[in-house]
Image (cartoon, rainbow, N blue to C red):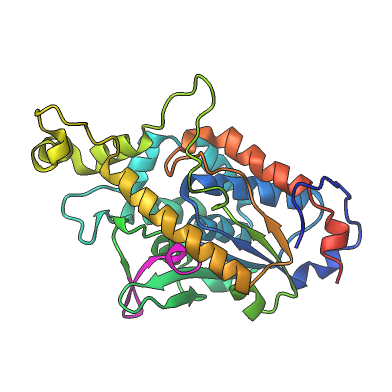
Amino acid sequence: MTDLEASNNTTPNNLAHDNKKLGIALGAGAARGISHLGVLRGLGEKQIEPQIIAGASVGALIGACYAANQFDEIEDWFKSLNLKRLVGFLDPKLTSRGGLADGAQFVSYMKETFGDISFSDLDKKLIVVATDMTTGREVWIESGSVWEAVRASMAYPGVISPVKWDGQYLLDGGLVNPVPVIACRAKGAERVIAVNLNTELLGSKRKMPNEKPDKSGEIIEQSLMGRFSEKVMEKVNPLLNKNGKEKMPYNTVDVLSFAINIMQDKITRSRLAGEPPDVMLSPRLGHIGMFEVDKFDEIYQEGSRVTGNVDWQEELSF
């Protein structure tokens, strides 16, 4: 496994013919997933093009576009994304069951913009990882509608409703396998690159000097729950009453995010210890909030940075 802090920018000249044996596992991580774009762009500049892609949550979204040869398009989409547009794609509805939003608007947009793609249309092998809500089993989706599969893999608990797929109700793939290295191995990859977005996730909610606090969770909550959010919570939460007690500093979305972060940190460490990749890329993005999509440049550049710190000639020699 490579030490990402050792800087060696050797450009491989003989890896292109081995790309068919190369897999990449794109990890879960919400807005931090923008760094996948920087990683894949950096790999492409070195003529490294994995042909087996496994993704969980946002990793499934970017992996799907990469496998469909629509990488430039998804990169432009993320560049144009802001919090207001993100809320629109979440498609919040008071009638949604199992979550604050059902994500139908997202699927419709992806089909309209990128085409109604099925797995059989892809030039590269794609494995979308999701979680069976009732059994906790890891589910690999490899057929059917790509965007419906991605929607299932991104069904973040409590925020996006579970997706019914082949008789199962599926949730976010990051719940069981945040960095699905084993899926790449199972589908024939002899070398696997993993992009872990959960490094330094806990205890690293730090901000740069003069940087504004992350309000994205609060904005998302208010947008999703509308007029009920603040009024109901003021009455229900004893920390918000007027008896002089300290006000709760975190909103509902923040608490959900912290809970998932704790879980994913533990699961990621355990899975990667037993299923190590050949090259581990670990962008340092622990300070990035779940919905901070407006920090595109910072997140993207961190993906580029870790990709440039690897001796690819040595690490991917077959």
Foreground of the two, 243 or 128:
243
Using the rendered image of the protein, determine whether residue 59 is visible from the camera's viewpoint. yes
Q: How many marks?
A: 0
Up the image or down, 252 lies above or below 59; here it is: above
Estimate the x, y position of residue 227 in percent, counting from the top left: 14, 36
Residue 243 among those drawn in magenta: no
Residue 171 among those drawn in magenta: yes
Which image quarter is the N terminus in?
bottom right
Q: Is residue 6 left or right of residue 96?
A: right
Estimate the x, y position of residue 9 in percent, counting from the top left: 85, 46
Estimate the x, y position of residue 268 in percent, counting from the top left: 53, 63
Q: Residue 246 lies in what quarter of the image? A: top left
Up the image or down, 157 lies above or below 138; here it is: above
The boundaries of the magenta stretch are 164-177
Up the image or down, 201 lies above or below 246; here it is: below
Identify which residue is drawn at 38% across, 49% down.
258
Estimate the x, y position of residue 290 in percent, counting from the top left: 43, 44
**Residue that extends furthest to the right in the rendered view of this protein:** 13
Identify which residue is drawn at 15% across, 34% down.
240
Foreground of the two, 2 or 173:
2
Which image quarter is the C terminus in?
bottom right
Using the rendered image of the protein, determine whether residue 179 is visible from the camera's viewpoint. no
Identify which residue is drawn at 82% across, 45% down.
7
**Residue that extends furthest to the top in the rendered view of this protein:** 210
Q: Residue 305 lies in what quarter of the image? A: top right
